[in-house]
Amino acid sequence: MTLVVGAHPQNLSLSILARRPKSVAALREKGLTFFVYGAGSQTIPLLKAGVLHLAGTGATPPILAKAEGLATAVFGMSGPRPERGGLVVREASGIRSLSDLRGKGIGLMPISWHTQFLAAELDAAGLRWSDVRASEIIPVTAKDAFLEGLLDAIVATDPLYSQIAGKVTTRVLAAPGAAFSNRSVYWGVSEVLRDRPDAVSALLNALIESDRVTANNPREAAALLAGLNGSSAEEWLPALMSRPWGVDAPDDGFLAEQQAHANIFAKFGLIPHAIDVTDTVDRTHFSAAA
């Protein structure tokens, strides 16, 4: 059976890999193919429907998948990503701290790391989810509402952040990398991870090599992304140059962070009940990768 790997604009490593013809051809020989789609928010539905077998997202969807009873596990992760942008407000809004966000509207990318980031920041600041009016809004619409002064705050990182900051003066209240490490994670259906370790290791090897090339030549990678989400190569370049590249094995620290955030999700009512995320990490494949 050919395994399908999802690639979408919110996971740059897989988006770049899926645009390297030689890598795609080599992975096809290992029984892997790519499905390129437009929104990372659709990863869980695509996994549930059997369209995807392996995917890359932020760290939030694996928690949500576990809460829904979907058997999946993370087999690789990036380092922490302190990206440009974060929780953004207009400078003229008068909002100076997270406590000033009480009762304010906040736009989040649907089913993404934005929810985990905001929940961690609110919890660290002693706030509850119900203290703000957080809502999942597709990025282009959230950007438009924010620029028109109708939306109080938005979670935005490059290239979206640069597009916003180029039109209005902004203030970043919190940036990814502090209360929330903002890692990319690579994960898949547990049955597939168990039955096709060779294919999973091949994907890991390809990701490791692609990330190495990207780190050494970000302009070439930016050119591969030109047009993605309507952004030019020059608009992608700051995002590529500001983040770490490489793939690591999911470790105890990552698992502890995921459990802590799953506990926050349960406390805030973002998932229906408390969950144990121990089985959402599978480290066995990384040892077989280069």
Image (spheres, helix red, strand yellow):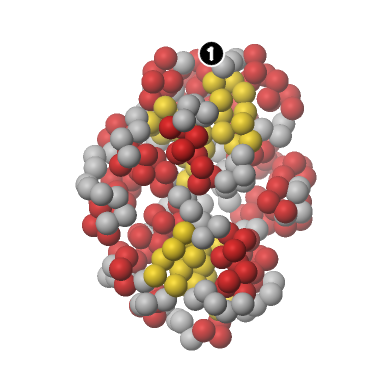
Q: Tell me which residue sits at (62%, 61%) in the image.
A: 140
**204 lies left or right of 126:** right
Q: Position of residue 52 (x, y in %)?
A: 52, 29
Q: Secondary structure at mark 1?
A: loop
Q: Tell me which residue sits at (70%, 20%) in the image.
A: 25
In the displayed structure, would residue 234 be above or below residue 124? above
Q: Position of residue 13 (x, y in %)?
A: 60, 39
**279 lies left or right of 158:** left
Q: Position of residue 34 (x, y in %)?
A: 62, 28
**289 lies left or right of 63:** right
Image quadrant holding the C terminus, namely top right
Amino acid at the residue labelled 1: Met
In the displayed structure, would residue 159 be above or below residue 27? below
In the displayed structure, would residue 91 be above or below residue 32? below
Nearest the viewer among 288 and 157 is 157
Q: Tell me which residue sits at (71%, 34%) in the image.
A: 19
> Is residue 31 something one can see in this rendering?
yes
**264 lies left or right of 215:** left
Nearest the viewer among 199 and 147 is 147
In the displayed structure, would residue 164 be above or below residue 139? below
Residue 245 image-quadrant placement:
top right
> Is residue 17 something one can see in this rendering?
no
Residue 146 image-quadrant placement:
bottom right
- Residue carrying label 1: 1
Q: Tell me which residue sits at (72%, 31%) in the image.
A: 20
Q: Position of residue 255 (x, y in %)?
A: 32, 41
